[in-house]
Every structure is written in structure tokens, then in C-alpha cells.
Amino acid sequence: MSQATTKPHDLAGPTGDPLQLIDVDHVRFYVGNAKQAAYFYAHTFGFNISQVADLTTGQREEADYLLTQGNIRLLLTTPLTKDHPAAEEIKRYGDGVKDIALTVFDAEKAFEQALVNGAEAASEPRTLSDKHGSVTVASIKTYGRVVHTFVSREGRYALPNVKNGAEFMPVFRPIESPVNEYNKQHPCGLKYVDHCVGNVEEGKMNEWVEWYENVLGFSMFKHFDDKDISTEYSALMSKVMASGNHLIKMPINEPAKGKKKSQIQEFLEWHDMTPGVQHLALRTDDELASVAELRRRGVDFLKLPDTYYELVWDRVNDMLTRHGHEPVREDHERIKELGILVDADDEGYLLQLFTKPLQDRPTLFFEIICRRGSQSFGKGNFKALFEALELEQARRGNL
Ligand code: FE2
């Protein structure tokens, strides 16, 4: 196994900016039962159950399962004591995303710079180390219950080594599971986190847009959606923030007034009126193969009205030819069979599909997305999508 080492002069990053982001280190979920949740994400979405830190590795306050697929690392955390902060959060919010952790060159310097830029600390820097290397973590609060942890890694725990199977941090041990072998034979093809969407309260979107600009040096992505997105009944406003290197895009939604309840408002009401992560979009290079495999495994996707496919090809292929692009190359009939959504802009097209909520509360869900030139978020699908979402909300008695 190759071992990358971080040279001291690299600590501030090649640009000298302590907030230069290297990667999405991991996404941490707080869940009621990580051992069981690990099997759900492994069997339905094709994540490998790679490592664990729990009582058997000397960790007595919480159990953590590291799930991996492509360059996606999900960390499922369950509190082992009633006094663990996750216990209270699970009571209030159910299962969901707690932390979008970002790999940086020096977590302590990144944390200090973020505080200077106006961030509130969530947890002070601490370093876990052993003879193989070290991992330093420090966290800041963002919207609602969510934090960003800065992570810097040295020695054996450097990210390139972790991607090759090295331990995630001291106290983790690898797991052998038959499901990992099954996933190798039947890949779902998910590669990395394309974007991560937050829901905040009505009137708060612009505050959080400014927070990402001021604290993390993000900027408004050129394809933001700055006008009302609405159906007859429900509406939202959304702006997309992107890191300097476009490593991660973080759209921020707020509810807007409609005749009936916005899907954002529904999220907030089932999330103790607290902002949080609404969805993670996971990128694939082959939408049809990924969705076919995920459907075969039982993933519950949002169902679009049949009328969607009567209108979509003219809309999308007109846009593509107008801007000198080839029409959608994937089999149109197969796209309809799999219930995949298509949208286009001046740069190309994208294929996307949304799951239903991943837990009993109508809160977090996943999006499976494939980009063919388009860098936007499927604005052309919003109306069709909202109508489908409203149908689901009505079924839950939440409209
Ligand atoms: Fe999305």
C-alpha cells in the first residue's frame, strides 16, 4: 500500500489559503442503530461496509460505521450512552445528516480562519494519533443542526491511503462482509457527492448564502435559481453556493408561500423546525445502469406522472440543438421505463432521479445524478417534480 505523507510546507495548502478544500472527507449521519442502517445502505445503495469503531475497538461512547463507494464515504454514528449529544439529536430529528466534513491541509488553521471569518465553533481542534499517523479534526456550526468538520490527515491516515483501504482513523478496524463481495459483483456505480442541499427557514436563505461567502469563501454558482419555483400549491426559493474549486456545491432552499404547504416546510416540521440537509446528490457516469441496479435492489424512487414523458423530449432536445449539442444519447424508451428525469441547459443535459425519504420521517433523501455537460440542477423538472412530491405529501396527510 502506498503511503502519502504531508510535507510541513504544504500545511497551509499550495495557495496559502487555510480554507482550501481537498475533498469531501466524509458525510456523517446520526442514526438510531448504525449496525442496522449500515445494512440498509449497503444492500439498497451498494455501499461497502468497510470499517467500524465501537466497543470492540475500545470506543465506548459511540459506534461508527464507515461505508464506502467510489469516492463517497458515509459515516454512520449511533450513541452508546444517553448522555451522548447524538442521543438528543436523534430524539429531535430522527436519522439524518449531522456533518459534511471537508478535508483540508491543516484542520486547526482552517478552523481558526473560519472563526476569524465569523463562524461559531462546534468543537475545538483535537488530534487522534498513533504510531501510524494522525488525524486532526475541528468543527464549525452551519445551518440548524449541521456542522462542517475540517479534517487533516497525516501518515497512514492520509486520504489517498484511506481510499486504498487504510484505516479511516485510529480506533477503526476493517470489516469483512459478504455484502461487500456482492456489491463488487453488482456495482451501483455511485462515484462522489455532486451536491448537498440544505433546507433553512423562510427568510433565512440569504443569510446562509452570505455565511458561505464570508466564512468559507464560497461564491454563488453561475447556475443559481433565483426566482420562485412553484406549482399551484407549494413553492421554494433556492440559491447554489460553490467552493472555490467547485469541489462541492451546497444549494440552500427556503420555503416560499403557496396555496398549500411547501415541501421545505414539511421537512422543517418533521425536523423540529430546525434547518438540516434535505438531500445528497450522488454522481454516476451511467444513470441508466445505476438506476436499474438500485431499482433491482428495492430503492424506492419518486414516481413522476406519465405525462412527463409526453413533453420532455421536445423540451430537452430543442434546448440541446439550439445550443449546438447532440440530443440525449441514452435510449429514450429505457429512460421512461426506469422513470428517470432529464433536463438540459446551454451547456448540455443531465439525467437525475430522486428517492423517497430514506427514513420514516419525510426528511433526508438521495438524488442519483449523471451530467452530460450540464452543470445545473434540473430546474426544468421542478414543476413535474413538485406535482409528484405533492402527491406524496398528500398521501402522508401533510399537504
Ligand atoms: Fe439536487
Image (spheres, helix red, strand yellow):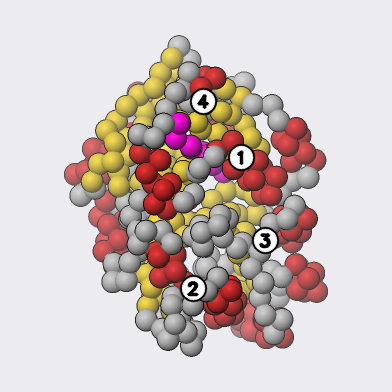
> Image point 65% across, 41% down: which residue?
39
Disc 3 under 8 Å from ligand 1? The reply is: no
The structure residue drawn at horizontal position 59% and vertical position 36%, both measured from the top left corner, is: 35
Distance of label 4 from label 1 (alpha carbons): 14 Å
Measured as percent of width and height from the top left, residue 335 is found at 75, 70
Which amino acid, by three-letter code, is at mark 2?
Asn
> Mark 3 or 1 closer to N-term?
1
Amino acid type of disc 4?
A: Asp
Quarter of image, res 149: top left
Find the distance from the CA under tag 2 to the CA under tag 1. Answer: 28 Å
Front in this rendered view, residue 177 or 308: 177
Whole-Å distance between the Cαs marked 3 and 1? 18 Å
Q: Earlier in the sequence, mark 3 or mark 2?
A: 3
Residue 10, by quadrant, is top left
The residue tagged 3 is 300
Residue at position x 54%, y 51% in the image = 193
> Do the numbered discs 3 and 1 sit on residues whose CB atoms are within 8 Å?
no
Whichever of labels 4 and 1 marks the residue nearer the N terminus, that label is 1
Left-right relation of 52 to 243: right
The nearer-to-camera label among 3 and 2 is 2
Label 3 sits on a secondary structure element that is loop
Magenta highlight range: 71-80
